[in-house]
Image (cartoon, helix red, strand yellow):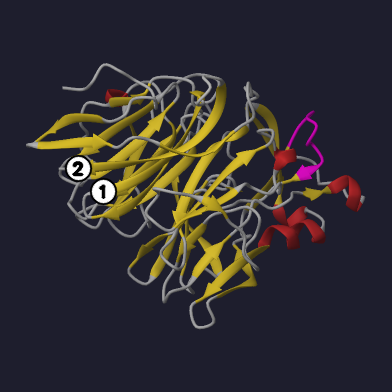
């Protein structure tokens, strides 16, 4: 039976999920606090954790406006050497000031920063006449990549990153070559950032499957399979066969041909049967349930996406984690933070969702497995009270255990 007390002030939580399994949530650990009384959206939130090359855990969060104009801003950075129990500020030569650190093959890691967008005004360049437009929080204009000025093309297809080399145990500057075929450049219309061209970043870790790396991208738009310009955000399966140095578009994971659903913030995982699972946000101005789809052939083709209505008409930044004990965990939210479990590890069926945090959060979570039955979750809480009882935004981690 789920506890009826919500919020990160709760010391611990425990509830049954079926099949004689229970979930326990340890007391939250505060990584960083904002100044007293801060409530501005975008600041001191969007908390992410990732695996660091030496076995430690990296923690970063956003501390600026939630806008394209803030891309490239340094992220406050922390590191933990004890699986999230304690944290300290962190910086090291060669590691970009934003972006997460994700494992590749052969001990290599990659960090793709949230790059400063290309400034058309500064470069005294203009994009070609838009090929299409759609609305998702802003009007967005789409331009054919091959018709854009060469400096814009080079910025898009050659993305600066850092790579960890295990032999020298150092970060070195590197470049990712990104697929340009049938690509579309987007800008925001009638917006303070309308002259800025953004590029993608790795919000989620690339998935290692066999000898390939797979990544679900929505920040890069491509022509649809019939050659038409998409009417909304769509989700693309990208593949790398050279340990993350270059990425090619493999397939379209999901798109709405009518343009009613903005399909964003996807996450890929591999289930216990070796299928790919992709859970996708589709809510923007209107709350909508998440969508889920599966691939049985490493992302070459995908099942028709279905709505996860049984998990509620919400679902921003869904996060998936398959634990070695065979249970798949899904976190999502807005409002609040919710958890559901696929007890057979397939992602085909999910338990009744449980609300870990009812409100006062951006609902963005990441999860990092710690052991066969444990994971660490990062999130934010806007109404945290400090030791003097004063409201501060908090970014936190919390350990989840399945027993």
Q: Nearer the viewer, residue 70 or 4?
A: 4
Mark 2: secondary structure: strand
16 inside magenta stretch = no
Q: Residues within 10 Å of mark 1 (few under 14, many from 20)?
A: some
Query: What is the x, y in percent for residue 220?
Result: 60, 48
Secondary structure under tag 1 reads: strand
Farthest-out residue, right: 124
The label shown at residue 402 is: 2
Q: Residue at x 63, y 55 (%)?
A: 113
Left or right: 56 as drawn, with respect to 271: right
The residue that mark 1 highlights is: 374
The reply to whether discs 2 and 1 touch (Cβ–Cβ < 8 Å) is: yes
Viewer-closest of 57 and 246: 57
First to last magenta residue range: 188-196
User: Quadrant where the N terminus lies?
Assistant: top left
Tell me residue 356's x, y (percent).
33, 27
Q: Earlier in the sequence, mark 2 or mark 1?
A: 1
What main secondary structure does the magenta stretch of the protein show? loop
Between 162 and 235, the one lying in front of the other is 162
Q: Residue at x 16, y 41 (%)?
A: 343
Can residue 305 be seen from the camera position used here?
A: no
């Amino acid at each position: 039976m789920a506890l009826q007390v919500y919020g990160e002030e709760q010391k611990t939580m425990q509830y049954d999920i079926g099949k004689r399994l229970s979930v326990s949530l340890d007391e939250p650990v505060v990584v960083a606090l904002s100044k007293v009384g801060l409530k501005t959206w975008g600041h001191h939130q969007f908390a992410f954790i990732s695996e660091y090359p030496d076995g430690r855990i990296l923690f970063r969060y956003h501390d600026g406006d939630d806008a394209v104009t803030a891309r490239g801003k340094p992220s406050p950075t922390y590191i933990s050497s004890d699986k999230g129990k304690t944290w300290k500020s962190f910086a090291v030569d060669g590691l970009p000031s934003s972006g997460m650190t994700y494992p590749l093959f052969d001990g290599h890691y990659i960090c793709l920063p949230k790059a400063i967008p290309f400034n058309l005004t500064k470069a005294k360049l203009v994009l070609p006449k838009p090929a299409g437009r759609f609305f998702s929080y802003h009007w967005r204009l789409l331009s054919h990549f091959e018709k854009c000025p060469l400096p814009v093309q080079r910025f898009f297809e050659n993305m600066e990153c850092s790579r960890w080399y295990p032999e020298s145990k150092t970060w070195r500057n590197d470049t990712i070559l990104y697929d340009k075929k049938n690509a579309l450049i987007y800008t925001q219309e009638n917006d303070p950032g309308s002259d800025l061209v953004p590029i993608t970043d790795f919000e989620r870790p690339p998935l290692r499957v066999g000898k390939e790396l797979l990544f679900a991208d929505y920040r890069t738009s491509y022509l649809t399979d019939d050659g038409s310009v998409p009417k909304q955000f769509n989700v693309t399966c990208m593949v790398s066969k050279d340990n993350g140095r270059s990425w090619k578009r493999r397939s379209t994971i999901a798109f709405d041909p009518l343009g009613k659903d903005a399909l964003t913030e996807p996450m890929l995982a591999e289930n216990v049967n070796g299928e790919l699972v992709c859970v996708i946000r589709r809510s923007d101005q209107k709350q909508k349930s998440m969508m889920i789809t599966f691939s049985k052939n490493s992302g070459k083709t995908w099942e028709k996406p279905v709505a996860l209505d049984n998990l509620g008409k919400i679902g921003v930044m869904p996060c998936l984690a398959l634990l070695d004990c065979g249970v798949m965990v899904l976190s999502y939210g807005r409002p609040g933070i919710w958890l559901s479990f696929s007890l057979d590890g397939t992602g085909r069926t999910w338990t009744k969702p449980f609300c870990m945090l009812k409100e006062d959060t951006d609902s963005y979570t990441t999860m990092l497995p710690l052991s066969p039955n444990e994971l660490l979750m990062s999130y934010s809480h806007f109404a945290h009270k400090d030791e003097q009882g004063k409201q501060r935004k908090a970014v936190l981690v919390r350990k989840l255990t399945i027993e």
